[in-house]
Image: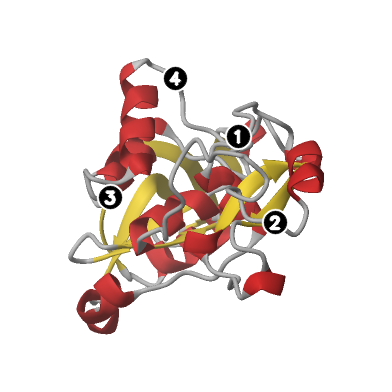
Amino acid sequence: MLAGMASEISQQVLRTDVAGMPLEWIDYREAVRLYHARQVAYDCGTLLYTVFGGFSAMNGRRSKIDVNSIIATHGTSQSLSRNRDKYVPPLNNRTLFKRDGNLCLYCAMRFPTRDLTRDHITPISQGGRDHWNNVATACRRCNNYKGGRTPEQAAMELIAVPFTPTYAEYIYLKGRRVLTDQMQYLLAHIPRSSPLHARLTDQLFSGEQVVDTHFHD
């Protein structure tokens, strides 16, 4: 039996290693399994769910597991710690559009995900590559106008410089609905020089909850 935020049963839990390094998003079932297996070293954030189990034959008490929004599991990710500066996350449209805040980087207008495209700044036909630093979120109109040209050739200007997300930034970008406490935790692992750090800090200080719900398909 599940109690608590019943209407938010899909809310993801942020899992970290014991050193606090963000690792992944998991659902409440996986979180309960980790609690039950005593793999959770500590938790923080807010209480999301209380999951009730059976009654003890010894004392008649009912078991329960409280699931918090952030849980740290035993062990450290030494490989990730050593290689995090070299980590390049996989590129896909959903995380690309979220990196750019659902803004077309040419006309500076915000669009629903369904109206956005992946533009190669230096076109593939001109030797451009399909990587984070050469792609920008573009509305269909701007992408069609630009065609197989570079921004300079099309007399268009980017409003922001594309960047490759760090591991912690990619964890944020993958989150379906990031709660304020989870965002504050992730923000501590995002470089201050990152454009994403500045944007999310502004959202947090403005009291705006950082969620990924406004521009779903």
Give, as a three-letter code, the residue at label 2. Arg
Binning the other alpha carbons within 10 Å of mark 4 as few (below 14), some (14 to 19) or many (20 upward) gives: few
Q: What whole-number distance in Å separates the C-alpha atoms at marks 1 and 4?
A: 18 Å
Give the x, y percent position of residue 118. 69, 54
Identify the residue under disc 1: 103
Please indicate whether residue 137 sits to the left or right of residue 13 in the image.
right
Identify the mark at residue 208; answer none if there is no mark: 4
- Quick one: SS at disc 1? loop
Disc 1, disc 4: CB below 8 Å? Answer: no
Q: What whole-number distance in Å separates the C-alpha atoms at marks 4 and 3?
A: 19 Å
**Mark 1 vs mark 3: which is more N-terminal?**
1
Disc 2, disc 4: CB below 8 Å? Answer: no
Please indicate whether residue 9 sits to the left or right of residue 174 in the image.
right
Residue 61 or 47: which is nearer the viewer? Answer: 47
Q: Give the residue at x 56% y 60%.
A: 29
Residue 2 or 75: which is nearer the viewer? Answer: 75
Identify the residue under disc 2: 149
Give the x, y percent position of residue 157. 55, 38
* Foreground disc of the pair 1, 3: 1
- Quick one: SS at disc 3? loop
Identify the residue under disc 3: 190
Q: Give the residue at x 42% y 48%.
A: 67
* Foreground disc of the pair 1, 4: 1
Give, as a three-letter code, the residue at label 1. Leu
Q: What whole-number distance in Å separates the C-alpha atoms at marks 1 and 3?
A: 21 Å
Residue 153 or 108: which is nearer the viewer? Answer: 153
